[in-house]
Image (cartoon, rainbow, N blue to C red):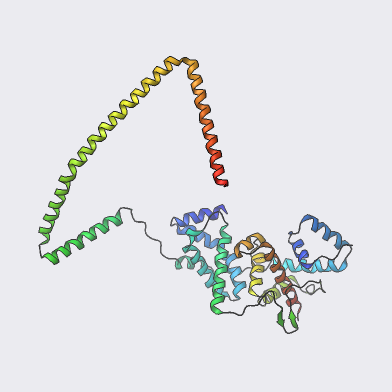
Amino acid sequence: MTEDRQLVSRALKGDRRAYEMIVRKYEQPLTNYLSRMTGERETALDFAQEVFLKAYCSLASYRPAFKFSTWLFKIASNHLIDHWRKKKLPTVSIDQPIEEKDGPVMPQLADPGPSVVRRFELAEIRQRIERALEAVPEALRELFVLRHVNEFSYEEIADIKSLPVGTVKNRVFQAKEMLRRTMGRP
Amino acid sequence: MNACPRPKAIYLYLEGELGPYEAAKLEEHLECCAACREALEERRLLHEAFTSLPPFEVPEGFARSVMDSLPAPETAKAGWLAPLLAAAAALTVGLAGFHIFTGQSVFGMLVAVNRFLGEVVALFTPLAVKTLKIGSVLAKVAGNLAGLGFSGLSALTRILGPEGIALAAGLSMLFALLAFFGARRFLRQGVGS
C-alpha cells in the first residue's frame, strides 16, 4: 500500500516510469475483473486501457488515506456502469424473480439440495463457472468477481461500490447460489 | 440438535467470515446432520473452484501500449521563462502596433522607449534612496533598544542575585506551562463543539 502511495507520488511529479510500474502491477487483476464483466477479451483490454488512462488523468484526486487498488477498481466499476448505460443493456432486478425456462427463480435460494458438482473435476467446475457467470446479472456478478477473483475483502468491496457490507455479503451469496443452480442444469 | 444453518452461513464459514460462536454452533450441528455435511462438502468444492479461476492472459506489451496512450507530460519549463517570453511577445506586438498606427520608424520607437525608461528610473531612484535611508535609521533605533534591554536585564540579574534568578526562571516556566495547557484545552473545546 505504501509502495502504491510512493509510486503515485512519483507519478504526480511527472515520473512516467512510476506509473508504468502501477500499470504492470494492476494490469492482471484489472483485466481479470473486466474480462469476467464484459465477457469479451478485446473489450476487456480496451476497457483496461481506458481505466488506466482515466486513473492517470485524475491521479491528483487520489487521496492516500484510501487504498489505491480500491480507488482504481472504483474507476473501473464506474466505467462499466457508463458502458452499460450507453449500450442500454437489459438489467435484471435482483429483488424480483428471474424468468427462466423452468419457471421463475428467486436469487435467494436456500435449501442444501442434492450435490450437483461432485461428479465434476475441479477444472471442469471452473469451466462451468466461467460459462455460468455470463448468466448472472451484472450487479451480482460484479460483486462475486471482486470477492472471489480479485480477492477484495467485503469491506473493500463495500467501499468500491458504496454499498453497506451486509448488502455486499448478501449479493455475493446470491451470485454463488445462482451459479450453483445454473451449473446443476444439464 | 440445533436447526440447519442457512447456506449463506455455510459460505461465510468456508471463507472464515463467520464469528467464532456461530462457527462453533455450525460445527456442532454438522456432527449430527448428514445433509448439512453434504451441503458443506459441495460448497467447499465450489468455493475452491470460485477462488481458483484461471487468470486472464494479458498480452505482452500491454503496459507499454497503455503508457503510449497516455497524454504527453508537460515539459518542465523554468518558472521565469514563461513570463519572460510573454513580456517579449507583448513588447514586439506593442512595437509593431505602434509602428503600424503612427508610421514612426522602429529606431525612433526604441529611442522613445529608452527615454521613457530613463524617466522612470530618474523618478524612482530618489524614492529608493530615501527608503533605504529610513530603513537604516529604523535598524539603528532597533539596535539601541536591544542594547538598552540587555543592559536592563544585566542590572536586574545583579539586583536579584542567583536565588532571585532561579525564582524568576521557575515562575516564568510555570506561566509558560499554564499558558500552553490552557491554550490546548481551549483549542480542544473548539474542536469538539
The spot of residue A151 in percent (x, y) is 65, 62
Question: The N terminus of chain B is located in which quarter?
Answer: bottom right
Q: Residue at x 55, y 69 (%)?
A: A78
Instruction: Give the answer, above or below, for where B6 lies relative to B188.
Output: below
Question: Looking at the image, can residue B58 be seen?
Answer: no
Quick one: A74 or B157, which is closer to the camera? B157
Q: Residue furthest front?
A: B193
Q: Residue at x 14, y 66 (%)?
A: B101
The spot of residue A60 in percent (x, y) is 47, 58
Instruction: Give the answer, above or below, for where A68 lies relative to B179.
Output: below
The spot of residue A38 in percent (x, y) is 59, 75
Left or right, A27 with reference to B138: right
Q: Residue at x 82, y 57 (%)?
A: B24
Residue A154, located in which quarter of the rendered image?
A: bottom right
Left or right, B109 with reference to A150: left
The spot of residue A157 in percent (x, y) is 63, 63
Residue B6, located in which quarter of the rendered image?
A: bottom right
Residue A27, located in which quarter of the rendered image?
A: bottom right
Quick one: A20 or A73, which is closer to the camera? A73
Quick one: B122 or B88, which is closer to the camera? B122
Question: Looking at the image, can residue A122 be seen?
Answer: yes
Q: Residue at x 64, y 72 (%)?
A: A139
Instruction: Give the answer, above or below, for where B110 lies relative to B70.
Output: above
Quick one: A25 or A141, which is closer to the camera? A141
